[in-house]
Image: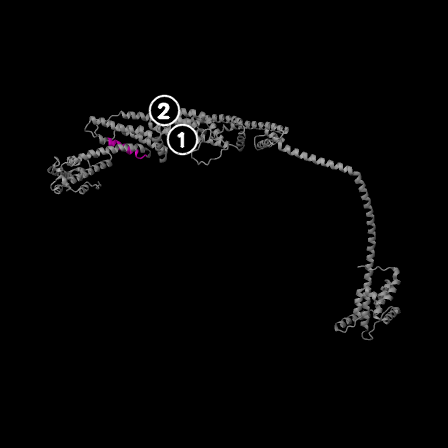
């Protein structure tokens, strides 16, 4: 909003404008005044307007009555005198022109000039209201004029400040122009210098880039002082820091292959790097060798074998230098060999710490425990040694269950780790095998008992099998155990064969009428029984026994230490059978009344009863059973003919059986009707009185030691007799044989021609033809 600023010299012009323009100037210059004019110049007859005007008149009336000296008029006069007279006159003149009340103004002026007091009287109605309206307009215009003057004063100060600011801005523009000119002059003067500085900056960046590349190259293809020290210094132990330095060196050599494969051939930097890293690596491997050799010598003397992570990593590194690894393993092998040998001899002679466990040689009087303790010590040492070596070479588990056999590849196909383990174990226990072999051989050769020899042989066989599953059959210890096991079996078989030869030379006592097995047979079979019990306890299960039995049947000439019971049976069972048969024949010739067949059957039955509880004697039991069956058939045949002779039917049954039908059977001598009648009478009497029918026993068969055979033979003979009687009845009933009254002939004597009745008399179940 732009407000015109009055000037002191313009009072006359303002007065002139007031007179010329009248009220238009006031209205156009002050809209509030115009608004008041419109309000005050309007006649309002409504109640609210009248009430407002009445209140206003009372205000001015009370002000006039309370201030009779005319303070308000006096103050107004003072304000007019203090402000610009022309402006006041203009404002007041405008008001007088608008209102048209000049007389009131003159009256007011007269009141002011008289004594400085105003007196208000309410002579006529509405006078006070008119005066109040007039005074209100005047007061508002005064206040508006005062505000305008204050606004003009403030704007004049602002104008002065803006003028000063304009001066400063102009001065600044001048300074900037001068500075710009100086800058242009300086730029032109330093242009060459800036170009030189730019070139230097670019060169500096190139140098920095080259420096960064060189730093990266050195960081990638060289070792720090700490890493070099870790590789070559004896003060830095083999550990994580050392292995990290070796890894970085190997990585440098691998990365350096790029420098060695340029188009122009290997670069000088590449050759230098390869040479320096090769030297450092060799020193590192030498350091590992020295450390491993020392650690192997220390650990080799300990009974508790533990492999640290550092040692496992060191051995893994040395695999890249087989010659260095072999050298370090040689020291380990030598140390372990000495330690194991010394420990074994100490266990034999001195025992454990403080005498517990006691020395093994204190049990030398008990060969089985003596050898068992030595083998148990070796087995424990082998197990610990293999576990140590597997941990040393980081051999992974193959998923094998505890106690199950290991699967060994053939030489040339096994892994490198397995070859190392095999060689180290062979070297470690190589010297232990010597005292072990000597002591076992001495113990085996000193045994006179075949049973003890067999127990020792089985014990050795067990440990040989266990060691083979643990370290393979090509190991030194396995070979040693195989040799002493073969010796033990050889000693056992030698003792058994000597016993069998002694049994074969045995003769029976001619004065002895008994038919039971003789004492030499009982002693021999008792030894056989104990051997079979030992063999069964060694095998532990039926399946393994059957497997060994099948292996022996397929390959009887197999290794002596891989023996099943077939060979033992051939050596011990067959001579006993042969002795029974041979000695019985000799005694039978010298004592014809002596019952050889019952004696042989008793001996074979006893031998079979000893073999029956053992499943692995199937082959021997089969052979003996065949001989028993043969003897049973012979005795059955002899017993059948014996009871047929006693019953009087032997001749008749023979004639009926051999009849060819060429002539009637009744015409053949020996079976004519009267002869048949006599035989049937004798047979009937025999059925009623014979103990062989009444008690179902036979005096001869009662001497069989096995009641089952006695019953079997006797029932078989009675069955054949019943069948023979049935055949006789059938032949007699045939018309072509011309027996008169055949039914009467057969029905006069028991069993009255009824075969079924005969079976009932014998107490047997009738058999189908």
Residue at the image position 18 percent from the left and 34 percent from the top: 641
Q: Which sits in the foreground, 10 or 648? A: 648
Can you tell which quarter of the image residue 694 is in?
Answer: top left
Can residue 102 be seen? yes
Can residue 233 be seen? no
Residue at the image position 82 percent from the left and 44 percent from the top: 178
Are the two marked residues, 1 and 2, in contact with CB atoms closer than 8 angstroms? no
Against 5, is 121 above or below? below
Q: Can you give x and y, in whole percent of width and height, for residue 381 in the image? A: 45, 30
Quadrant of the frame with the C terminus: top left
Q: Which sits in the foreground, 139 or 742? A: 742
Crowdedness near tag 1: few (<14), some (14–19) or many (≥20) residues, C-alpha within 10 Å: some
* Residue at the bottom extreme of this rendering: 124
Q: Which residues are magenta?
A: 600-614
Q: Would residue 167 appear left or right of 513 to someone viewing this image?
A: right
Q: Can you give x and y, in whole percent of width and height, for residue 371 in the image? A: 39, 28
Q: Secondary structure at mark 1?
A: helix
Against 393, is 170 above or below? below
Q: Which residue is mark 1?
A: 465
Q: Would residue 292 appear left or right of 687 to someone viewing this image?
A: right
Q: Main secondary structure of the magenta part?
A: helix
Indicate whether residue 611 is drawn in magenta: yes
Quadrant of the frame with the N terminus: bottom right
Indicate whether residue 145 is drawn in magenta: no
Q: Would residue 388 appear left or right of 452 to someone viewing this image?
A: right
Q: Secondary structure at mark 2?
A: helix
Q: Can you give x and y, in whole percent of width and height, for residue 339 in the image? A: 47, 26
Q: Can you give x and y, in whole percent of width and height, for residue 655 in the image? A: 15, 35
Q: Which residue is mark 2?
A: 445
Can you tell which quarter of the image residue 672 is in?
Answer: top left
Crowdedness near tag 2: few (<14), some (14–19) or many (≥20) residues, C-alpha within 10 Å: some
């Amino acid at each position: 909003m732009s407000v015109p600023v009055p000037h002191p010299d313009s009072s006359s012009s303002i007065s002139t404008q007031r007179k010329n323009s009248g009220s238009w100037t006031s209205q156009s210059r002050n809209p509030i005044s115009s608004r008041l004019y419109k309000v005050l110049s309007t006649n309002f007859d409504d109640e609210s307007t009248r009430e407002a005007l009445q209140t206003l008149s009372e205000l001015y009336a009370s002000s006039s009555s309370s201030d009779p000296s005319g303070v308000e008029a006096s103050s107004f006069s003072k304000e007019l005198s203090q402000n610009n007279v022309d402006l006041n006159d203009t404002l007041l003149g405008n008001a007088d022109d608008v209102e048209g009340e000049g007389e009131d103004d003159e009256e007011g002026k007269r009141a002011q000039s008289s004594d400085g007091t105003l007196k208000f009287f309410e002579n006529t109605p509405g006078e006070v209201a008119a005066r109040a309206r007039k005074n209100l307009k005047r007061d508002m215009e005064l206040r508006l004029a005062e505000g305008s003057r204050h606004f003009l004063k403030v704007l004049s100060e602002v104008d002065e400040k803006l003028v000063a600011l304009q001066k400063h801005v102009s001065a600044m523009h001048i300074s900037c122009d001068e500075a710009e000119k100086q800058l242009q002059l300086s730029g032109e003067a330093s242009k060459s210098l800036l170009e030189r500085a730019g070139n230097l900056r670019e060169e500096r960046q190139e140098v920095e880039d080259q420096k960064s590349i060189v730093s990266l190259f050195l960081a990638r293809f060289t070792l720090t002082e700490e890493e070099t020290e870790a590789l070559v210094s004896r003060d830095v132990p083999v550990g994580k820091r050392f292995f990290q330095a070796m890894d970085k060196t190997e990585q440098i050599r691998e990365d350096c292959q790029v420098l060695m494969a340029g188009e122009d051939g290997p670069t000088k930097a590449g050759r230098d790097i390869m040479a320096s890293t090769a030297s450092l690596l060799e020193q590192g491997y030498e350091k590992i060798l020295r450390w491993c050799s020392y650690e192997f010598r220390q650990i080799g003397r300990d009974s508790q074998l533990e492999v640290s992570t550092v040692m496992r990593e060191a051995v893994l590194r040395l695999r890249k230098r087989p010659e260095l690894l072999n050298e370090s393993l040689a020291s380990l092998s030598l140390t372990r060999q000495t330690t194991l040998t010394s420990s074994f001899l100490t266990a034999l002679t001195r025992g454990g710490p403080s005498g517990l466990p006691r020395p093994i040689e204190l049990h030398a009087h008990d060969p089985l425990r003596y050898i068992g303790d030595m083998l148990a010590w070796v087995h424990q040492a082998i197990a610990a040694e293999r576990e140590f070596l597997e941990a040393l070479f980081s051999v992974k588990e193959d998923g094998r269950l505890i106690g199950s056999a290991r699967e060994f590849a053939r030489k040339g196909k096994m892994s490198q780790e397995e070859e190392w383990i095999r060689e180290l174990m062979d070297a470690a226990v190589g010297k232990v095998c010597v005292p072990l072999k000597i002591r076992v051989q001495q113990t085996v050769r000193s045994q006179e008992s075949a049973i003890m020899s067999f127990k020792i042989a089985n014990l050795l066989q067990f440990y040989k099998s266990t060691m083979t599953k643990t370290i393979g059959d090509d190991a030194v210890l396995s070979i040693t155990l195989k040799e002493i096991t073969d010796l033990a079996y050889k000693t056992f078989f030698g003792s058994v064969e000597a016993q069998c030869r002694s049994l074969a030379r045995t003769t029976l006592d001619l004065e002895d009428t008994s038919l039971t097995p003789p004492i030499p047979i009982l002693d021999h079979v008792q030894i056989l029984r104990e051997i079979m019990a030992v063999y069964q306890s060694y095998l532990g299960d039926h399946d393994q026994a059957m497997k060994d039995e099948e292996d022996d049947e397929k390959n009887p000439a197999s290794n002596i230490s891989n023996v099943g019971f077939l060979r033992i049976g051939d050596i011990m069972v067959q001579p006993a059978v042969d002795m029974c048969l041979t000695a019985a024949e000799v005694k039978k010739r010298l004592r014809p009344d002596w019952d050889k067949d019952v004696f042989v059957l008793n001996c074979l039955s006893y031998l079979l009863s000893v073999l029956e509880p053992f499943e692995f004697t199937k082959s021997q039991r089969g052979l003996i059973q065949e001989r028993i069956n043969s003897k049973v058939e012979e005795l059955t045949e002899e017993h059948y003919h014996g009871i047929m002779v006693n019953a009087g039917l032997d001749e008749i049954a023979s004639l009926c059986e051999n009849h060819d039908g060429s002539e009637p059977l009744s015409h053949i001598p020996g079976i004519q009707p009267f002869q048949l009648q006599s035989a049937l009478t004798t047979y009937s009497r025999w059925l009623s009185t014979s103990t062989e029918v009444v008690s179902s026993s036979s005096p001869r068969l009662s001497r069989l030691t096995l009641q089952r055979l006695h019953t079997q033979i006797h029932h078989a003979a009675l069955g054949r007799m019943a069948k023979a009687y049935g055949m006789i009845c059938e032949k007699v009933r045939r018309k072509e044989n011309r027996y008169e009254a055949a039914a009467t002939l057969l029905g006069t004597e028991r069993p009255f021609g009824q075969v079924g009745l005969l079976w009932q008399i014998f107490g047997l179940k009738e058999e189908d033809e």
